[in-house]
Image (cartoon, rainbow, N blue to C red):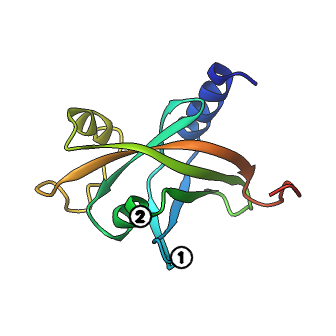
Amino acid sequence: MDNREAHMELKSYFEATEGTGVLATADAGGKVNAALYARPHVVDGETVAFIMTDRLTHANVQSNKHAAYLFIETGGSYAGKRLYLAMVKEEKNSPLIETLRRHCPADGGTKSKDLYLVYFHVDKILPLVGSDMAD
């Protein structure tokens, strides 16, 4: 699958699928954190972005660029996706954040705080349940 096909597949999936997302990160020492996160903003077939406040998840990706995003589809089955990610860059208080937030109505009371648009390379995509034995 080429980059364009992968982009369309991820973009279509997250636009059409309701569910709950969890972003897991760890600090430089390996101490793990998990937080509820909205669906990712699909940039291209290899890149997604999340809007973050300056809290633990954001601090963790500053010292350890690796993260995992778990998306559980609504409906009671074990359907969804696991994205294995590596942070590539971020933008602080980017004008793009407000555009993206229009598609994501929950603001978590963050209107007056610094916001970061954090970009991740998608290293691997797996189904929610089941595994590639080469993990």
* Label 1–label 2 contact, CB within 8 A: no
Residue tagged 1: 30
Residue at the far right in the pictured view: 133
Calculate the distance from the C-alpha at mark 1 to the C-alpha at mark 2: 10 Å
> For numbered disc 1, what is the local secondary structure?
loop
Q: Quadrant of the C terminus?
A: bottom right
Q: Dot 1 surroundings within 10 Å: few (below 14), some, or many (20 or more)?
A: few
* Pick the front one: 31 or 70: 31
The amino acid type, in three-letter code, at marker 2 is: Ser
User: In terms of image quadrants, where is residue 114?
Assistant: bottom left
Q: Where residue 87 appears, x then y in whole percent?
A: 47, 49
On screen, 17 above or below 71? above
Percent across and percent down for residue 50 are 40, 48
Give amino acid for label 1. Gly
Q: For this rendering, which residue is in front, 71 or 30?
A: 30
Does 51 sit above or below residue 12?
Answer: below
Q: Image quarter for residue 60? A: bottom left
- Tell me the residue that label 2 is attached to: 63
In the picture, residue 19 is in which quadrant?
Answer: bottom right
Q: Residues within 10 Å of mark 2 (few under 14, many from 20)?
A: few
